[in-house]
Image: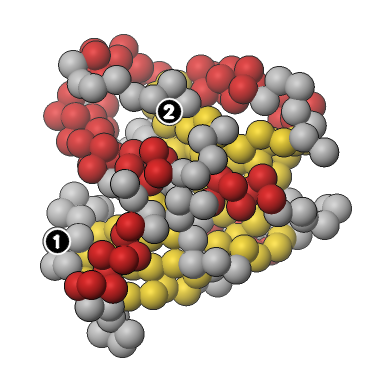
Amino acid sequence: MSRKVVIEINFNNYGMDPQRLTREWLGRRVGIFRRFTLHCLKAQTNQDFLAVLKLSKESGELMQEILAEQEPLPSNIRFGTNIESVRAILAFAEGAEDIYIARLDSDDLYHKTFVQQLYDVQPQPGTMALINQNGYLWDSVNHEMAPAFHRSPQFYVYLYKTAEYAAGYRVKLPGRGTHGNVIELPHELLAPRNYVNIVHSSNTSIKKVPPKDRLNREEMAAVLREFMI
């Protein structure tokens, strides 16, 4: 069974905030992406993946101008509109039976072995999603970190047949259609502590690192070495 792994990031294609279409907003968020998430993508032990950062159709040209002023991204990490991203995914997955599409925010991290895990896992027939319940919460402003557990967090993977994805099929979440509903799909759990959910100065909702089980500075550094280069 052949598969391809895709990491899908909704950069500014969702939301009502008009600021997300401005050069200032885009430049700031690209800076955050380069500070955090880009390093985790570059750190992946298996680089046979495609990362797509989805843009609103209104900001595609402006983003290309911003990117042209910066250090080039690796060829497997691309910004594009939804249509451009889907085309890139299908070209990348050509000839593969399955596409595994992992969701990630542009300011969070996956473990450096995450892509390899997705090539190694052998889900049962009928499984629609893989869920990462175990990770870390890291406050990069106050330098605090603790292990985290969420029953149905935003760190999950949809499993598609390439032909069905190419035909337009997309997983539809039950209930309210939020991250919390992914657990209601036929799913399997990935056991490793696979994600870092990051608090930084530009977060729209500030999470607090719980005082229980906080890591010391040396432990934090050791964890981050497993996620970033």
Q: Position of residue 38 (x, y in %)?
A: 34, 39
Residue nearest the viewer, comparing 39 with 173: 39
Quarter of image, res 11: top left
Q: Decide: is 186 above or below 60.
A: below
| Residue depicted at x 44% and y 67% | 135
Query: Label 2 neighbourhood size at 10 Å, few (<14), some (14-19), many (20+)?
Result: some
Which residue sits at x=14%, y=61%? 141
Circle count: 2
Residue 138: x, y in percent?
28, 65
| Left or right side of 92 for 39 | left
Q: Is residue 7 shown to the viewer in this render? A: yes
Q: Position of residue 98 (x, y in %)?
A: 75, 36
> Which residue appears farthest toward the right when viewing the image?
125
- Say which element carries label 2: strand
Question: Could you say which quadrant of the image residue 152 lies in?
Answer: bottom right
* Left or right position of 123 against 213: right
Q: Earlier in the sequence, mark 1 or mark 2?
A: 2
The answer to whether residue 57 is left or right of residue 218 is right
Kindly tell me whether residue 172 is visible in this rendering.
no
Please give the residue where the numbered disc 1 appears in the rendered image: 141
Q: Is residue 84 left or right of residue 173?
A: left
| Amino acid at circle 1 | Val
Describe the element under mark 1 as helix, strand or loop.
loop
* Residue type indicated by callout 2: Ile
Q: Is residue 112 above or below residue 3?
A: below
Q: CA distance from mark 1 to mark 2?
A: 27 Å
Q: Which residue is mark 2?
A: 77
